[in-house]
Image (tube, rainbow, N blue to C red):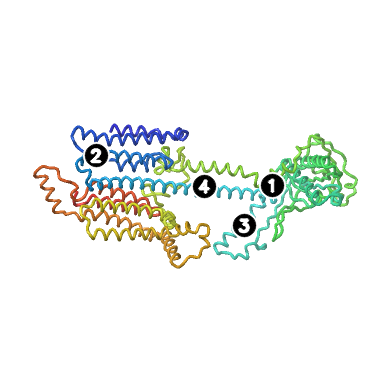
Amino acid sequence: MIAYCIFIMVLSVNFFEDYVTKRPWLMYLSSALATVVWVGVDLTVNMYHYYINDWLLTSIYDSYVLYMIYMFLPMPLLVGPLLLGALVSVLYITYFMNYVAEKFQYELTDLYTYNYMSVDLSHYICFNLLGTFFRLMSDIIVRASFLDRHQYVMENIWLRSARHQEKMLLHSILPPQIARPIQDEMRSRVARVKKGLESQSRLFHSTDRIMAVQIHPEVTILYADVVNYTKLTTTLTVEKLVTLLHDLYGRFDMAASHFRVQRIKFLGDCYYCVAGLTRPNFDHAKCCVDLGLSMIAHIQDVREERQLDIGMRIGVHSGNLFAGVIGEAKLQYDIWGQDVTIANRLESTGLQGHVHISGSTLMNLDANEYVILPGTKQAANDPFLQMHNVSTYLLHGDNSYRASTQTVDVIDSVSVLNLRSKMGSVDNAASKELHEEFLKMPLGARNIGYFLTCRDANGEQSHVPPNLLTVYFLHFQDPSLEWKYMRQTDYMLKYSLLYAWCIGVSLVYIQLVDHSGPNIYCFLSDFMVILIWSSFLFVSWYKKICTWRYGKEAAQHRYGRFSCLMFRIKDKVQRSLSLRISVYLFIIISYYQVLGIIVIDCNREEYTVLHIESKLYQYEMNVNMCFRPWVLTNMVALIMGLSFTFTRIPFLVKTMLAYRIEKEAKGCPFD
């Protein structure tokens, strides 16, 4: 009990996860100290009984200590448990050799004595192999799960990012209230096509599409035109002209976003937009006028930087309009209405460097904020404006409307189409989301009650369904999910078969060495079992061997019929759950057969007589006359341990089989 308390106290430091994570050496130190405590207690008890009671005992907890090192102690890297397991094995082997030298001090030259030592040595080697294989398989599975989860999170983040960029791009072309109905309708049509409720030819049929046209009252329209644009087309090269327009319209887009104005489109040197379109805005007139003054300031900057004779003529009018999407093959968003035409006429009759506004726009402005001049003569003589009784005015701005100069590089950096600038934010989001996902996993001291309460480390309800996995047998409660998981290809099968072959050969060796009198049946049985094991191993590793042999040319190499047959058999076994279970059951049953030969071949009548005589005459019976009980126990422990190392085998099947082996071992007639 004292040793148990010390053992728990030493390992309890690992419950402080944040502290231990910053000092990983504490995990290895606490594991080593806990192992020293347990091994020390085991050997100390044996030496105590030897010197006090003159009892010569073998080690008791060696198998349990090795299992504990590889399966339960908190050492992340394989090197730690491997070195600790090897050190513990050396300690036990040293004690065992001392035990053998003491017990057989006059028989050390006997071959049986060395066989006796080699059997226990084989046990330690097998237990270390079992632990190493378990850790390797666990690391591979955990890393594969991490990569799968990482891929899922990254794909989810990239999908959300792509959808967000798609949404931004769409909303830069179409207002949300127009784009949303079209998106919903297209999604519903795609869903109906997938369900077979609608033919694919009707997917984009325009006659069935809803009319995405809306009426927008109380808005302000701005039309802008670049003065001397025609002259620029003849004096500048195409590359310089496109760069100029890109710089200019990029500045306008940034200013429109700043003043909450929706740009409709631009045609050559014409740029028009609307304020109060996407959402109601009581300052729609002020936003458009301020945008016009800002556009004049921007074009003056471009004029000074590039030494070009260009200017800006702007018309602004407030009223109502229709806005919607037209077209079938290519959708186009546009605005219509009498007030739109008025704004266009105000631009064409305006004055360079001024914002030409109507009386309705002036009524929505604070006149004290602007320098107001009379309208142009062209507007006064314009028939369309006269017909609609439109009074016009000119506004002139000063440097207070000069927005910060935006170069082409700055505009590109904030463009919705620039994916490179969003790489860092996506990576940061992925790192943060991965961290949050791993915090929700049922790992560590803080999440002991996860399976029972389905709450995360902060005590909040987890988003994972509480009945997704069972608590004890680690399988999906939904049979369809469990069936899909088990039917996946088992790529680790060849490694499991390799380890099973090594353990099987070791068991046969232990059986032959420890068996009191092997006969011809024993040899034939062992030969057939090893032959079948070797066949399984050959089939599972044949493709890998061919890959090693031909190297980079393995994919283009022409294989014969025998090789193709081996490939098909191996792939079929890997993909078939029933075949994997059959191979797994055969291996475990063959292990049990090797184990049973030792028990069955013993003379039960002679054993019974000697057992009765030892009770009558009160002497210690030779427990090794048929087989050594601890050897049989270690063999059963190896078989039970190996039964759990196979992947893609239902955990319930492995548990029931291990329980059956344990019951059969307990029901041995010689116990």
Which is in the foreground here, disc 2 or disc 1?
2
- In the picture of the structure, the residue carrying the numbered disc 3 is 185
Using the rendered view, name the quadrant where residue 20 is placed.
top left
Q: Which mark is residue 278?
A: 1
- In the picture of the structure, the residue carrying the numbered disc 4 is 150
Q: Residue furthest bottom?
A: 561
Q: Which mark is residue 99?
A: 2
Q: Position of residue 574 (x, y in %)?
A: 42, 59
The disc, 1 or 4, on the residue closer to the chain's N-terminal end is 4
The disc, 4 or 2, on the residue closer to the chain's N-terminal end is 2
What amino acid type should be assigned to the residue bearing mark 4? Answer: His
The disc, 4 or 3, on the residue closer to the chain's N-terminal end is 4
What amino acid type should be assigned to the residue bearing mark 2? Answer: Tyr
The disc, 3 or 1, on the residue closer to the chain's N-terminal end is 3
Q: Secondary structure at mark 1?
A: loop
Q: Which residue is nearer to you in this view: 410 or 459?
A: 410
